[in-house]
Amino acid sequence: MRDDGWVRPEHPLTVGQSKGPLAGMRPTEAQLRRPSPVAKVSHTLSVPLADRLESFAYFQRISESAVIEHALRDFFEQADDDTALGDLLRGRGAGLRRKARA
């Protein structure tokens, strides 16, 4: 564990996959539970899923970001084993997405 509370996962990224000073790091349970700075991320969703998210968030008066963050926390709380979580997603049809070239 580093002195800032971040811990290395059991299977760190291999050489060449590093994306910055926290690459291969994962937050502790305490960090996941307390308010923290936010990171802006952008991902693609299928149109029906994006429409459902937008409608749900609007009528429930909850931000889309809060819905996504909550869903991701629930997902990662299922297991500490990233391989098992990856297998679960792949078993449900998830895989790599590539941007279409124009």
Image (cartoon, helix red, strand yellow):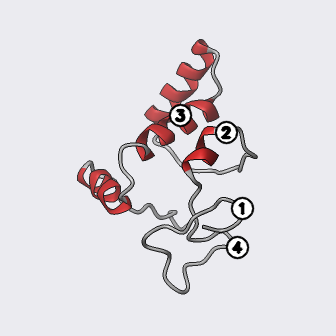
Residue 29 marker: none
Q: Where residue 67 appears, x then y in whole percent?
A: 56, 30
N-term-proximal mark, 1 vs 4: 1
Residue 21 shown left or right of residue 25 in the figure: right
Please rate how many residues cluster around mark 1, counting C-alpha atoms within 10 Å: few if below 14, some from 14 to 19, many from 20: few
Residue 21 marker: 4
Q: In terms of secondary structure, where does tag 3 sit?
A: helix
Q: Amino acid at mark 2?
A: Arg
Q: Nearer the viewer, mark 4 or mark 2?
A: 2
CB within 8 Å, label 1 to label 4: no
Q: Amino acid at mark 1?
A: Asp
Residue pointed to by mark 3: 70
Mark 1–mark 4 distance (CA, rounded to whole Å): 13 Å
Q: Amino acid at mark 4?
A: Pro
Q: Nearer the viewer, mark 2 or mark 3?
A: 2
Q: Nearer the viewer, mark 3 or mark 1?
A: 1
Mark 3–mark 4 distance (CA, rounded to whole Å): 26 Å
Residue 94 shown left or right of residue 100 in the figure: left
CB within 8 Å, label 4 to label 2: no
N-term-proximal mark, 2 vs 3: 2
User: Which residue is rendered at x = 63% and y = 47% of the image?
Assistant: 31
**The N terminus appears in which quarter of the rendering?**
bottom right
Q: Amino acid at mark 3?
A: His
Please rate how many residues cluster around mark 2, counting C-alpha atoms within 10 Å: few if below 14, some from 14 to 19, many from 20: few
Q: Nearer the viewer, residue 79 or 40?
A: 79
Q: In terms of secondary structure, where does tag 4 sit?
A: loop
N-term-proximal mark, 3 vs 4: 4
Mark 2–mark 1 distance (CA, rounded to whole Å): 14 Å
Q: Nearer the viewer, residue 84 or 100?
A: 84
User: Which residue is rendered at x = 39% and y = 54% of the image?
Assistant: 80
Residue 4 marker: 1
Residue pointed to by mark 2: 34
